[in-house]
Amino acid sequence: MSKTALIPSLTPEGSLSRYMEQIRQFPMLEPDEEYMLAHAFAERGDVASAHKLVTSHLRLVAKIAMGYRGYGLPIADLISEGNLGMMHAVKKFDPERGFRLATYAMWWIKASMQEYILRSWSLVKIGTTASQKKLFFNLRRLKGKIGAIDSGDLHPDQVTHIADELNVPETDVISMNQRMAGGDRSLNVTVGGADSDGSSEWQDWLEDDADDQETLFAEREEFSARQKLMLEAMSILNEREVRIIEARRLSEPPLTLEQLADEFSVSRERIRQIEGRAFEKLSEAVRSKASELKLLPEA
């Protein structure tokens, strides 16, 4: 939309009632007028027509925003995001499809608000898949429906009911409920008991269970060396032995004895014998070379 077409906005410090009075001044559109305005914008890019389409639906945006107040985010931000969704809907709206703009715009408005909520509600990304988003935006409603809105952990039967209602795994219900109940906590929160001087922060007590960089580097180096040994040792095998070892020991999933027997036109027992002999030759070659390089402990 052009900056010349101003749209009322609700600031965090502004009055919601005053904003509602402002947007009520924009008249609702009759179907024929809405159709003509949509055509004017779609065909000629008429900004004045787009402005009328947007402003006539600001009450719809505000109404939808009220439904998301339970997430603790500023209503001004919700309305602002919803207005952006409304503008996007006007740009995409095709009046020839036969339905009203409000029906089409509703989904853009909700999507815009929901994306904002998911970005802002938690520092940790809380909804990535479609089922997780559905769970996030319906959990409070369903908890209220079964009288569990103020409870902490859900009872097993409540978890089952919600999971069945939304067609999601029970583990997802438990996890989402815990995350929504817990909220975020700053890593800089001061912690400590009576003996503490109050200068310790929560992040000072967090431990990283992952291996340090030196250990990871050493493991990568050893893995590369062993991989090189394996490739060198494979050179002592003939073509058929290499094929069978790769198919039976290095492939995922491995081929069956029957599949290889058909490939080489021999019995399954013969394939098993070749595999066993080739593996022994390979193991001996690897052990011998590794001992030379001191990659394996001496027996």
Image (cartoon, helix red, strand yellow):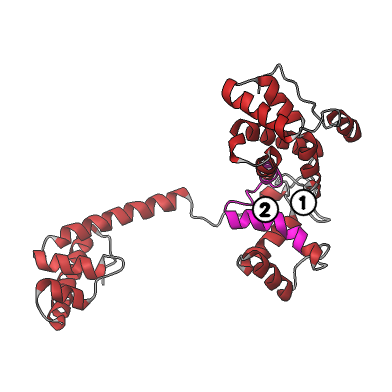
- Please state which of residues 202 and 159 is positioned toward the viewer in this rendering: 159
Q: How many numbered marks does the figure carry?
A: 2
- Quarter that holds the C terminus: bottom left
How crowded pointer 2 is (Cα within 10 Å; few <14, some 14-19, many 20+) is rated as few
Q: Residue at x 48, y 51 (%)?
A: 212
* Magenta stretch, main secondary structure class: helix
The magenta span reads 116-142
Residue 262 appears in the figure: yes
- Residue 225 coordinates in the image, percent (x, y): 27, 54
Locate residue 159: give its quadrant. Answer: bottom right
Locate residue 93: give its quadrant. Answer: top right
- Residue 203 coordinates in the image, percent (x, y): 67, 48
- Residue 95 coordinates in the image, percent (x, y): 62, 35
How crowded pointer 1 is (Cα within 10 Å; few <14, some 14-19, many 20+) is rated as some
Residue 146 sits above or below residue 293 on the image: below
Residue 28 sits above or below residue 182 on the image: above
Instruction: From the image, tell me which residue sits under label 1.
Output: 191
Query: Which amino acid type is shown beneath numbered disc 2?
Result: Trp
Query: Which amino acid type is shown beneath numbered disc 1?
Result: Val
Q: Residue at x 16, y 81 (%)?
A: 268
Instruction: Mark 1 and mark 2 in contact? Answer it, CB < 8 Å.
Output: yes
Residue with the most extreme front position: 32
The image's mark for residue 205 is 2
Residue 283 sits above or below residue 272 on the image: above
**Residue 119 is covered by the magenta coloring:** yes
Mark 1–mark 2 Cα distance, whole angstroms, equals 9 Å
- Please state which of residues 21 and 202 is positioned toward the viewer in this rendering: 21
Residue 245 relative to residue 100: left or right: left
